[in-house]
Image (cartoon, rainbow, N blue to C red):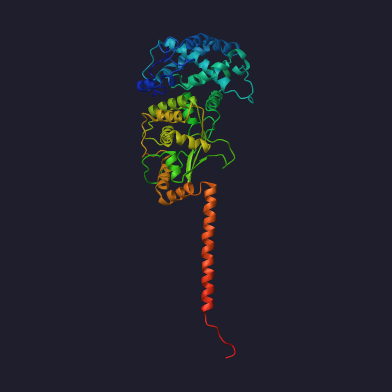
Amino acid sequence: MRASRARPTPAPEIYRVPVVLLAADRGAYQPRFLSLGPYHRGGSATATEEMRRNDGEKPGNLAYAVQGGGPPVLEYMKAIASIQADARSRYEGGVDMEWDAFGRMLLLDAFQLITLLEYLGFDGDDEPSETGGCAEQEDCRPRTGVLSSIGHDLMMLENQIPFFVAQNMYGLRHGDDGSRIAELAWRTIRSIMCGVPSAAASHPPAEKCQHLVHLCHAYLKPSSLGRSRGACAGEYGRFRRATEYHEAGVRFRRLCGEEDGSEQCPLLNVTFSNGALRMARHRIDETTNYVLLNVLVYEQRYLEAATSGDAGYVAAYVVFMSQLLGGPEDVALLSRRGVIEHHLGDDAEVCALFRGLAQGLVFDPSGDHYLRTVGVKLQAYYRSRVNRWGAWVIRHRLGNPWLAAAWLFGAMAVLGTILQTVVALLQYLDSQRPTRNVGT
């Protein structure tokens, strides 16, 4: 299965996670149930017993494809041989595997990925494929107890195969151009993201999918990207804590709730206008940590996020949240406003999560990122003495309804006293005016 090596070498797309990040949280970057690609294959030092057991079951997915009416195994092997040199070049640092072993791994992992995407991305409205699918075969369905582990492992940057390999195998089996499996992968990402909608113009995006982490990065693209950049001149230094903004009169609102009737909107959407900071509702749990960590590594390594505002939107959002949520009271404030719903131990864990996500990021706050306009407007509003004074009056004098009623009655009493004084003065002046004698 040796292929020609004369073709130009493409740039790597599947990266190794830096050692310093692995030391901080190894479990967030390495698979625990399913191995895809050469970095954590069954014979590697990082493979778990579950991963080795799963490797032994991978040939069953290929056997099912052949029995379901697809081409013979030899046709799949020839197709893999024609693309494995290209696939090999997509891994950073090279691949320490023999060509035949690498080709066999690609073939089995491609059908393992296809099987999982057919199950996780299956829609009840879909029509069964002519050659069958995982949704029709009970034996190929993952057990409920390992679904969370599968979702975790599919989002590991080091646990990927080039997506064009799976597209080629799927196209060879079903006779299409691979667009169907791209749609299944998109639905799988949506399932892992708990149904949060995407701002992408097409589902999946028209751009070529490199792997599932790249697809997740595209899924998280905010709606405002490219529209607000450069629209507001000035500097903001850094974002402040939610409680500091609250003391300056900033109101926190959930975006897309009351505005257009929809329950959710793209996760990274943030706007500020008329004193209201509107944010998409963010459900925070253990999935948030490992998904964003792996997307951030991909973004930082491949997309040069430090200088590209179009590419570094995930880093911009993470830095924004880490500065906004400086303490548990900030999390409590946003939770009361319906912006945050977390399923961690306490509010302090949410702060620690985003602080860990932002640690070590290459990010320029003065750069042309998509939240720059929001930062400049927030800073101007925060520095306004009128806004701060008005917020202080509302919070300390009108926040209590009984105190507000007392202020109202007091103001009415003062107004009544003033009116009474004015009326008495007018009457006095009228009495001092000389009267005209009509008879004279």
Q: Is residue 152 visible?
A: yes
Q: Is residue 370 visible?
A: no
Please provide percent x and percent y for residue 342. 51, 30
The vertical placement of 53 against 276, above or below, is above
Number of numbered callouts drawn = 0
In which quadrant is the N terminus drawn?
A: top left
Please provide percent x and percent y for residue 333. 48, 37
Front position in the image: 109 or 39:
39
Front position in the image: 190 or 411:
411
Q: Residue at x 41, y 26 (%)?
A: 298
Front position in the image: 21 or 123:
21
Front position in the image: 414 or 381:
414
Please provide percent x and percent y for residue 71. 56, 13
Q: Quadrant of residue 260?
A: top right
In which quadrant is the C terminus drawn?
A: bottom right
Please provide percent x and percent y for residue 141. 58, 15
Q: Quadrant of residue 373?
A: top left
The vertical placement of 272 against 79, above or below, is below
